[in-house]
Amino acid sequence: MEKKFLSVKDLAMIAIFVALIIVCTWITIPLGPVPFTLQTFAVCVTGGVLGIKRGTIAVVVYILLGIVGVPVFSNFSAGIVKFIPNTETGMLGGFILGFILTVIIIGIFKNLSKDKDNKIKALYLGIGMVLGDIACLTFGTVWFWQFNPMHVGLAASISACVIPFIIPDLAKIIVALIVSTQVNLLRLGQ
């Protein structure tokens, strides 16, 4: 019997996590050029529960919804304009695209921990989430530095895009790790 690329359960789980990412994105606190949202939390949980394939599909679907005009980005925004360099909205597109890296890295660490006990699985997921967040922050910051219309330098870009988010992102990762671990124990993520 041939195995399907995605089962009905897979599609349902992907849809649920796309919705989670959207809702968490809408929870926004402006902190300068880069807003504080719960996207990092949602993307970490998505990767931690769904893994590489389903998690990446969920994040890509989320991004595609925004590109075609569904208001799924922060402040209920949408459109390809989020990714056009040297515009006020396009300078943040790297963070959105960076979520693909985040979910892939988390999924890799989830796969690496498959045959381990629950504490080791949680450790692997935690490492994956931290490294995934670092990858997203790096990609987004470099994008911001290269494509912001104010042409600020690298140090100013790091000050705007990384420094204010270190503690909040660590807090979101800790909560995402707890949620992912609990959901995986319930076997919903399998």
Image (cartoon, rainbow, N blue to C red):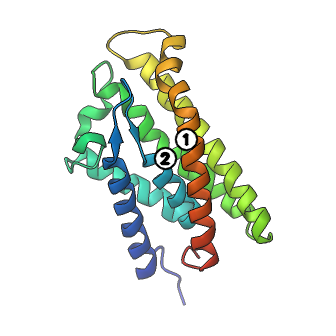
Q: Position of residue 130 (x, y in %)?
A: 64, 44
Dot 2 amino acid type: Thr
Q: Is there a contact, CB below 8 Å, between mark 2 and mark 1?
A: yes
* Residue neighbourhood size for the residue with mark 2, other residues' Cα within 10 Å, grouped as few (<14), some (14–19), many (≥20): many
Q: Name the residue at 69% across, 63% down.
A: 111
Of residue 143 and residue 167, the one placed in the foreground of this image is 167
Reading the image, the residue beneath label 1 is 169
Could you tell me if residue 7 is visible in this image? no
Q: Quadrant of the C terminus?
A: bottom right
154 lies left or right of 181: left
Find residue 141 and report its horizontal and vertical position in percent: 49, 25
Q: Which residue in the structure is indicated by mark 2?
A: 40
Residue in the foreground of this view, choosing between 161 and 140: 161
The answer to whether residue 99 is above or below residue 166 is below
Residue at far left of view: 69
Residue 90: percent from left, percent from top: 31, 27
Image spot of residue 158 (x, y percent): 53, 20
Q: Is residue 151 above or below residue 99?
A: above
Q: Is residue 22 left or right of residue 107?
A: left
Q: Amino acid at mark 1?
A: Asp
As measured in the structure, the alpha-carbon distance from the residue carrying label 2 to the one carrying label 1 is 7 Å
Check the picture and name the quadrant holding the N terminus: bottom right
